[in-house]
Image (cartoon, grey):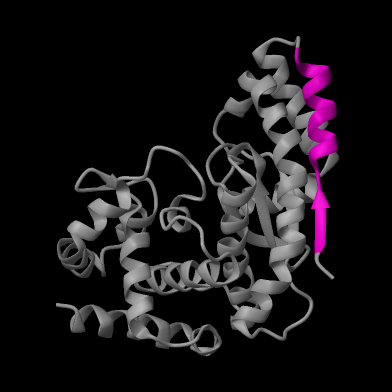
Amino acid sequence: MTRIIDTTAAFDNFAKSAFLETPIMRGQRWVEDYEGAYPDVFEAFYAEQGQPERGNPLTRELSRVRAQVAEGGPATRKAIEEVDPAVAEALGVRTSPGPVHVLMVGQMNANALVGRLGGEVALFHCLEWFQSEEGTRVLVAHEDSHAWHEIALGEKPTEDAAWMAFSEGMAIQASRVVVPDRPEYDYFWYGHAGFEEWLPWCQENRQQLFDLFRAALDDPEAGETFFGGGLVEGRWRVGYFVADEIVRALDRPLPELVAMSVDEGRAAVRDQLNALA
């Protein structure tokens, strides 16, 4: 059975009571009332995300975020309950228990991330990013595949560019299988508007992106550049396009990909990049 920790009631109680406070007091109440209600959750979340240097910027937008969480919380819970067992089946993972899912409000830094909670693999779903039910289903399938993959590996690999390409490419493939027939850009942007031209641009510049990724493969900053907040030719997150193309070209079933070791995954990416040169 899928396990879910839902912190949204605590967030709503905080938001209602802190609405008329000053920004400084809102930040203090966030820590005391919301984080204080789930200290283990936030300790685990910040262990993965990093402790913010300043107060949470979302405390200045409580009305908007509260409405987003009210809609996104139930939709995300439903998506988790439906998608989680489907992801495990698609990946051929038989390990039990599965990941712990946490519904929460984060720092607007990540839409979801995999960490550890009480020694178990946990998937933190940050509801301030919620856009739509269908986009959320794709996002849950993508991130849940990372969580199940980590359980199957029995370790959290170092996220160098080669491994990120393998892992992210596999997650995109899994989301297509579990949540089929969505617009193609949804598998990269999860329902966020304004990125419809991103995929055509990547397709038009496919070889250039492969060449740039291959050249940067051993750069310690390549992961952030291609998959994080960096820009490549003025575009964000083009590593996901490259990863999808590489793993798709491997033409191997998802259970076979999951069964590969970290070193085998990295080597497969490098071999495929050389084949595409």
- Residue 161 appears in the figure: no
Q: How many marks?
A: 0
Quarter containing the C terminus? bottom left
Say if 10 sits above or below 39 in the image.
Answer: above
Magenta-highlighted stretch: main secondary structure?
A: helix
Say if 230 sits above or below 1 in the image.
Answer: above
Quarter containing the N terminus? bottom right
Residue ID at (62%, 19%)? 60
Verify whether residue 15 appears in magenta: yes
Residue ID at (31%, 54%)? 199
Residue ID at (85%, 36%)? 9
Left or right: 70 as drawn, with respect to 123? right
The image shows residue 212 at horizontal and vertical percentages of 18, 62
Say if 117 sits above or below 169 in the image.
Answer: above
The image shows residue 249 at horizontal and vertical percentages of 32, 80
Verify whether residue 264 appears in magenta: no
- Residue 192 appears in the figure: yes
Left or right: 12 as drawn, with respect to 51? right
Left or right: 121 as drawn, with respect to 207? right
The image shows residue 66 at horizontal and vertical percentages of 72, 28
The image shows residue 173 at horizontal and vertical percentages of 48, 72
Residue ID at (55%, 63%)? 142
Question: Quarter-wise, where is residue 177 in the image?
Answer: bottom right
| Range of residues picked out in magenta | 3-19
Q: Nearer the viewer, residue 189 or 55?
A: 189
Question: Quarter-wise, where is residue 251 in the image?
Answer: bottom left
Q: Nearer the viewer, residue 161 or 245?
A: 245
